Image (spheres, rainbow, N blue to C red):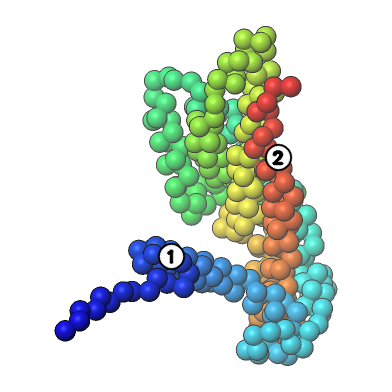
Amino acid sequence: MTATTATTAPPASGRTEAQEIHFRSDRNAKIRMYLGLAVLVIWGLAPFYWMIVTAFRDVGYTFDSTPWPTHVTLDNFKTAFSTGRGNHFGAALVHSIIIGVVTTAVAMLVGVFASYALARLNFPGKYAVLGVILGASMFPGVALVSPLFQMFSSFGWLSGVNYQALIIPNISFALPLTIYTLTAFLAEMPWELEESARIDGCTPGQAFRKIMLPLAAPGLFTTAILAFIASWNEYLLAQQFSTPKTQTVTVAIAQFTGAQPHQEPYTAVMAAGTIVTVPLIIMVLVFQRAIVSGLTAGGVKG
């Protein structure tokens, strides 16, 4: 008898069997990763997509389940800005912008110095201070409604144009977030650059302004965006402390009225929601380039 030796032909790709198994494993892992990312993106964007579709849909077809735009109209946006129906959405946009900008500016001004001190200096009770700041950010806002209402009433801030009744509480919520986020960011920065600037003759203020702030630009812009969004979306305190002359967009949308009594204006609410998200999208797109440029700004001495 003649013994024959069986040989296994190599894969057409030219890879060995072990390499082929490793290649298929990596490919399957990437497929699972991309499928998971696709599910997350769809899960996150689906409500926003449906809001836009409903915003442009005729009110007579509010509950039409067609997944693409049908019976397109711009009347819902006109209704959102219609003061004849008691909707003061246009003025509310201005009020929210004022409150959000002032809140973000004050929170960033105080937060950047406080976080710089917490990240740069060592002093007794440093971590206790950080713990108190973190605990303040977890304090429930509903517990503050009654005491703040009594205090603001005694100050006469709950009538007329008194933005401070909304700005001060918003700052109290935005400041812990600002300090805690910037402290973690500044703690990872190369302090050797600041020391080099001091050796070259810069004062502490000049080193902070010319070296550290440009390097901290990504963290500053990111934190500012978070603070503004938190102020822009706040509803609980705004519903209690705002007046018709300081009403924010969240309160204005909640008080929308329909064409008929007891009719919920879903399409107008969706149109207003679409408008409210536009400033946030524009802000992120504008700051995106600033964040990228801030990664290298100040890192090289000219």
Q: Which mark is residue 15?
A: 1
Q: Horizontal and vertical percent for residue 33?
A: 47, 65
Q: Is residue 142 above or below residue 16?
A: above
Choose the circle earlier in sequence order: 1 or 2: 1
Q: What element does badge 2 sit on?
A: helix
Q: Horizontal and vertical percent for residue 177?
A: 53, 43
Residue 263 in view in this figure: no
Q: How many marks?
A: 2
Which is nearer the eye, 75 or 143? 75
User: Which of the image's four quarters has the C terminus?
Assistant: top right
Could you tell whether 14 is left or right of 80 in the image? left
Name the amino acid type tagged 2: Ser
Which is nearer the eye, 166 or 93? 93
Name the amino acid type tagged 1: Arg
Residue appearing at x 44%, y 40% in the figure? 134
Task: Please tell me whether mark 1 or mark 2 is closer to you in this view.
Answer: 1
Q: Horizontal and vertical percent for residue 155?
A: 64, 41
Which is nearer the eye, 69 or 38? 38
